[in-house]
Image: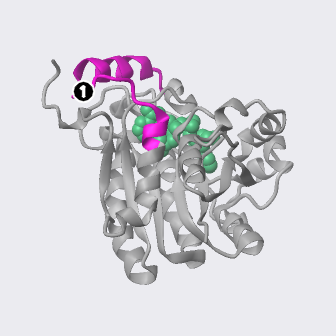
Amino acid sequence: KGKRAFIAGVADDNGYGWAIAKSLAAAGAEILVGTWVPALNIFESSLRRGKFDESRVLPDGSLMEITKVYPLDAVFDNPEDVPEDIKTNKRYAGSSKWTVQEVAESVKEDFGTIDILVHSLANGPEVTKPLLETSRNGYLAALSASSYSYVSLLKHFLPIMNPGGSSISLTYIASERIIPGYGGGMSSAKAALESDTRVLAFEAGRKRKIRVNTISAGPLRSRAAKAIGFIDMMIDYSLANAPLQKELSAEEVGNSAAFLASPLASAITGTVLYVDNGLNAMGVGV
Ligand code: NAD
């Protein structure tokens, strides 16, 4: 029987979420995605108009099918959490049931269970500010959108995950090494995400035999990365200094996620898997 995956954080065909969806689809999984509410209309209309058809092509020549797109805002756990200005915001008012709890309920209603949960989202409103200049609100917003969002997603999806299932998030080496420019508390958020990966591996493993891992990915020119502003420099740095001197493709991260989600990785949980051409292993630039 084919597996079913829910991938949170897909709003175009440039990011890691899209590439992970493709690799999972190529391996035979059914694909559901969660798309940030303000990005939903453009994503759905682009899908419908065939704008992504070229990027939907799988290795066997068929096109990736996304069975259903769910509106999602992972900073809100349930309707009681949503403040008035968001409720009445016209980008949100057109959609419904987009808090984490409601999305999990909708997926349960529509499909019953899932096997694979992917968290491929992050947001830090002050990411371009150094940590010393980051406000409390900016810091907490980065943690809310980029770290707690994962705790919440796993918490709400765990009851509908089939035993033996797998959960994956995306992290960045700025959690453990100094990467100037990755500010606003985003480095802190990734450190929390990696620590939570270990604790959640224990809790979800004991509770439902679910594996929990995170991929520490190298630089990719995604929409989110372009907003940070230093992505081209990071790609050049990796090309010059990593053991493998090639640009990292999103597909390589997608394939690693498919491996982690597969029975080939049945004893792997609580780990940070580097998919970065080996850059993490360097101690000095060359
Ligand atoms: P991306 O822009 O494709 O993905 C980020 C997604 O998060 C977007 O679709 C955005 O709409 C969504 N999002 C933001 N706030 C949200 C919210 N509150 N609720 C729901 N969705 C929300 O960019 P990406 O670079 O592929 O990012 C995916 C993951 O990969 C992130 O965790 C990122 O930190 C991580 N990562 C990226 C790089 C890189 O160089 N691009 C490197 C390492 C790790």
| Image point (45%, 26%), residue name | 128
| Image point (15%, 18%), residue name | 286
Q: Name the residue at the bottom extreme.
A: 207
Give percent across and percent down for residue 101.
66, 68
Give percent across and percent down for residue 186.
41, 40
Q: Is residue 156 visible?
A: yes
Q: Is residue 139 visible?
A: no
| Image point (61%, 72%), residue name | 1
Looking at the rendered structure, the secondary structure element under dot 1 is loop
Q: Is residue 184 magenta?
A: no
Q: Is residue 233 magenta?
A: yes
| Quarter of image, res 195 | bottom left
Give percent across and percent down for residue 158.
54, 74
Per the image, the residue denoted by label 1 is: 242
Nearer the observer, 81 or 188? 188
Amino acid type shown at disc 1: Ala
